[in-house]
Image (tube, rainbow, N blue to C red):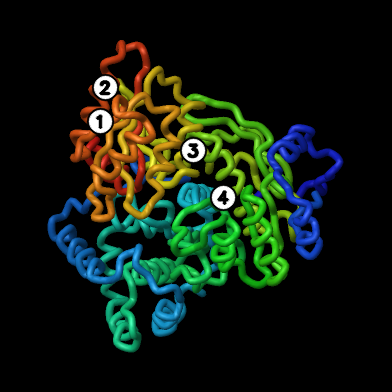
């Protein structure tokens, strides 16, 4: 961190930031009442290279052992089947000796942007020489991606070793519970155990679903991050952003700091009420922190961010889309809060370190370019809000004369809403299926696509490899200099399959 400087004078705040506040803050008068009882943060004045997604182990014996672990985990409840409580994971943590309490944590919830934000937070912390652990889900290609140490996925050997270490304790808890520990609960326990064993200086943890009863919620994080809340998993979390926020607010602990991305008003109300109840400190995007300026740059975007302690200029972020700039602002504020900026300390972090960290960030499967001539982009948007952000990012950052979509969704998602979000930017759409057993039936998805696009703009290819080839062929029908492209999207499973097919191993 840089040396302390003179306290930040609010009167010197840039006009640009005030403009952002005026333009981006959709506020309800009732929020003023809530905020009266809530404190707000107002400051008084190197990473791995190459593809961050691991390949299968090269050693056949290691690969065999990893597959055996995956097979055992697959006998448990999957991530879409759950019993909403932390009873079982708490019991497992108890017999493991509470490994999740061996290090401080930053806990991340929200509907979209969690993984990208987690990766940014991880990069920032590592740039300040902290040893990090990161837990995210689901994985793009390989299960070991979910647990990262020092900015890179845990090795297959260490993943296997960690599983074998906790397996007897998992079986003990299973024998005492009416319901066995789920796949996600076991993986979560593995992450916490691996972080304690490393040991890490700080863990960055993304919830799996919701918040209060999510398996990750046995940590007592000093910083709770809430990315934008929208409609997803409505059968389990609620049918409005406010209802969903009620579940997600469960990660906010007594005396914590809450970093709150821009939210629908009803979601913001719920989060702020929760902060009042637990005496949490709140920093709100568009108020205490945010984006001052943003310009498109080659390979990403150039930002000026307003943090909790002041401005950070000339930040290059090698990711596309306004949503990633917002994620960057949230990540920066979270790391500042972790270091006490805006509360105990009135200063900025070292800007050169911040620049290096952001310039190193990668987020696989998030507007990721994997091929040129024609350009093929992968994006894991899986709900309408994510699709709208992706569509905006594509329109802003890529000058395609014609864009072909390749879409496969999961059966529990709002596929029609996702297709409607993409309709304005897709000239044609190729409907297909990914390898997940949860993939939407191709005929059912095609029927929805015809409703949205019309029959003439819909192509059906049940196999993903054929679908990608068909989309590339359609794109190549344009003059070679016309600039057609392909976007493969709809699910993290679709993106993972496409990465393998396109040689990203």
Q: Looking at the image, which is closer to me, 41 or 444?
A: 444
Is residue 331 shown above or below 393?
below
Q: CA distance from mark 2 to mark 4?
A: 35 Å
Q: Any mark on residue 474, and which?
A: 2
**Which residue lies at the image location 51% right of the left edge and 49% below the top edge?**
117
Residue hosting label 3: 388
Q: Earlier in the sequence, mark 3 or mark 1?
A: 3
Q: Earlier in the sequence, mark 4 or mark 3?
A: 4
Disc 2 to disc 4: CB gap under 8 Å: no
Q: Looking at the image, which is closer to me, 32 or 294?
A: 32
Can you give x and y, in whole percent of width and height, for residue 226 in the image? 58, 56
Q: CA distance from mark 3 to mark 2?
A: 23 Å
Q: CA distance from mark 3 to mark 1?
A: 22 Å
- Check disc 1 and report its element: helix, strand or loop: strand
Residue sticking out furthest to the left = 60
**Which residue lies at the image location 82% right of the left edge and 49% below the top edge?**
7
Disc 1 to disc 2: CB gap under 8 Å: yes
């Amino acid at each position: 961190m840089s040396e302390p400087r003179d306290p930040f004078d609010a009167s010197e705040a840039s006009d640009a930031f005030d403009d952002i506040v005026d333009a981006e803050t959709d506020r309800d008068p009732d929020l003023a009442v809530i905020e009266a009882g809530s404190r707000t943060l107002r400051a008084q004045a190197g990473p791995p290279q190459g593809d961050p997604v691991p390949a299968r182990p090269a050693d056949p014996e290691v690969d065999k052992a990893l597959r055996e672990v995956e097979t055992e985990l697959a006998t448990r409840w999957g991530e879409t089947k759950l019993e909403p409580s932390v009873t079982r994971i708490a019991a497992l943590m108890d017999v493991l000796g509470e490994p999740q309490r061996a290090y401080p944590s930053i806990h991340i919830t929200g509907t979209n942007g969690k993984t990208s934000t987690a990766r940014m937070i991880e990069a920032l912390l590592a740039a300040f020489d902290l040893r990090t652990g990161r837990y995210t889900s689901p994985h793009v290609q390989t299960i070991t991606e979910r647990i990262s140490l020092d900015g890179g996925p845990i090795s297959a050997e260490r993943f296997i070793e960690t599983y074998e270490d906790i397996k007897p304790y998992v079986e003990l808890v299973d024998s005492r519970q009416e319901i066995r520990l789920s796949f996600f609960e076991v993986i979560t326990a593995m992450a916490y155990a691996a972080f304690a064993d490393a040991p890490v200086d700080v863990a960055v943890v993304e919830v799996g679903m919701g918040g209060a009863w999510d398996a990750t919620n046995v940590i007592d994080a000093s910083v709770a991050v809430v990315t934008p809340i929208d409609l997803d998993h409505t059968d389990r979390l609620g049918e409005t952003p406010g209802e969903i926020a009620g579940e997600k607010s469960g990660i906010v602990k007594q005396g914590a700091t809450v970093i709150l991305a821009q939210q629908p008003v009803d979601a913001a109300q719920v989060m702020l009420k929760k902060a009042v109840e637990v005496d949490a400190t709140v920093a709100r995007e568009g108020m205490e922190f945010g984006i001052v300026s943003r310009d498109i740059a080659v390979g990403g975007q150039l930002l000026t961010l307003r943090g909790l302690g002041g401005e950070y200029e000339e930040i290059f972020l090698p990711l596309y889309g306004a949503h990633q700039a917002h994620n960057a602002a949230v990540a920066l504020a979270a790391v500042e809060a972790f270091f006490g900026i805006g509360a105990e300390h009135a200063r900025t972090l070292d800007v050169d370190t911040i620049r290096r960290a952001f310039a190193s960030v990668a987020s696989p499967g998030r507007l990721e370019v994997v091929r040129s001539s024609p350009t093929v982009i992968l994006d894991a948007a899986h709900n309408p809000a994510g699709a709208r952000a992706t569509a905006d990012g594509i329109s802003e950052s890529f000058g395609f004369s014609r864009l072909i979509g390749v879409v496969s969704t999961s059966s529990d998602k709002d596929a029609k809403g996702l297709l409607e979000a993409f309709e304005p930017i897709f000239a044609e759409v190729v409907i297909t299926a990914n390898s997940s057993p949860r993939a939407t039936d191709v005929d059912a998805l095609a029927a929805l696509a015809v409703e949205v696009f019309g029959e003439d703009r819909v192509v059906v290819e049940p196999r993903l490899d054929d679908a990608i080839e068909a989309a590339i062929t359609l794109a190549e029908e344009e003059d070679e200099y016309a600039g057609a492209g392909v976007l493969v999207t709809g699910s993290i499973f679709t993106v993972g399959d496409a990465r393998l097919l396109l040689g990203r191993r």
